[in-house]
Amino acid sequence: MTRLLQAWRGEVQARALYNLLADRVDPRRAEVIRAIADAEASHRERIEQRLRELGEPIPDPAGVKLSLMQRLQARLAPVPAVMARMEAAEEVEIQDRYKRSTGDPQTDAVLQSIRAEEQGHSRSLESMQAAHRGAERPASGPQGKLNRILGRETWHRTGSGWISGAIYGANDGLAAVFGIVAGVSGATGGSGFVLTAGLFGAIASALSMATGAYLAERSEGEVAAANVARERQEVIENPDEEKEEVSLFYQLKGIDKDTADKLAEQLAKDPDALLKVHAADELGGAVEGSSQPVQSAVAAGVSTFIGAMVPVIPFFFLRGGVAVITAAFVSLVAHFLVGAAKSFFTLRTWWSAGLEMTLAGVIVGGITYGIGLVLKVSG
């Protein structure tokens, strides 16, 4: 009974996660992921049927919620990382939850039938991971052939969002200026020089991050434009292979090969139409004009400045040892919070990511403070 309820809960959560992920990927992969989500609903119905046969009440699916961390990671973390996590979860279910005997042959039969379908889900996720990376996989059928074609076009790439840039900007600003504040505090005993050094360090860090983010995002826009230009050149120079790619994309959507070939042939008569299909499916819609360098610059600059000002703020009001201790405390708390926020993108547990960032802060602050003390003594 416990195994059935665990499996039921897992299916409800898995469907919710799949639907969140499907909203973030290109239409071709979204169809596959939504199909898997629908299958999870079917699995849940089979488990509920078995529970009814056993005379057990059916839990309310509305009572099964994804945690805030799960939702944020599904919406913000890099898609390949989410796929890898989902594939790992599928593997656990295949090798453990649905494989071990419950002692009830009928329940085992239900779980074994679901296990066979979960193995298919795992293969689908593995295929999407490889296709997303542009890696060649030794698969058969349309997916394997498509992966081999895309694997040769290594210039495809996707970028990360400005939200992750903001978090990492806060991380960089906090870490850098905390080191400055700790070092100058050690050298001066927490005098007014700490405020001056920290303030200008925060401004310099923010400007550096903002200009870096602007140039990086602008470069990404140029890469997207170059991708389209190269794809246009592929259409001109290798029309047969491009037609085959389009046909394979349609086959992966469930269209039979003959119909897919005819559609590709028809599209090939208009190179611009063929290019639009590639932009939507092969490039995931990341084409010319999609970059936002100003938005990225503002997000990175502002977040870096905010993070950098955390260890500086106490020195607006305090001096001496009290200011140093207060700055160290608020800075380490901020280190933990920023580290926990980074787990949205790394898929690590929030507390381990937070503690790791805090430890890094302790090391940076301790070393720079120690160097400051040495300089004070020798000076």
Image (cartoon, rainbow, N blue to C red):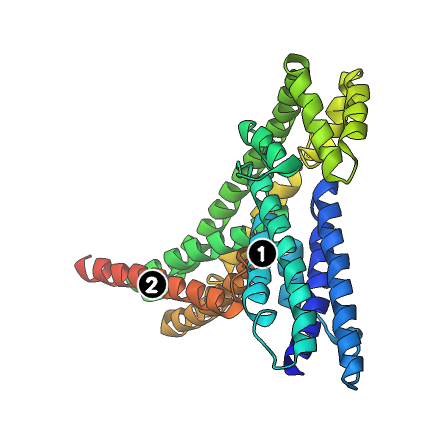
Q: Amino acid at mark 1?
A: Glu
Q: Amino acid at mark 2?
A: Ile
- On the image, which quarter does residue 272 sit in? top right
Q: Residue furthest top?
A: 237
**At which x and y percent is residue 156?**
59, 32
SS label for mark 1: helix
Q: Quadrant of the N terminus?
A: bottom right
- Vertical side of 140 occupied by 175: above or below: below
The answer to whether residue 58 is visible is no
Nearest the viewer among 351 and 113 is 113
The answer to whether residue 228 is visible is yes
State the residue position of label 2: 363
Indicate which disc, 2 or 1, sits on the residue closer to the N terminus. 1
State the residue position of label 1: 87
Q: Which residue is at 80% across, 15% downward?
A: 269
Q: Which residue is at 67% across, 33% downward?
A: 282
Q: Which residue is at 42% across, 59% downward?
A: 178
315 relative to 110 in the view: left or right: left
Front of the two marks 2 and 1 = 1
Nearest the viewer among 310 and 116 is 116
**At which x and y percent is residue 137?**
53, 39
SS label for mark 2: helix
**At which x and y percent is residue 222?**
61, 27
Distance from Cα at disc 2 to Cα at disc 1? 36 Å
The reply to whether the C-beta atoms of the residues labelled 2 and 1 are less than 8 Å apart is no
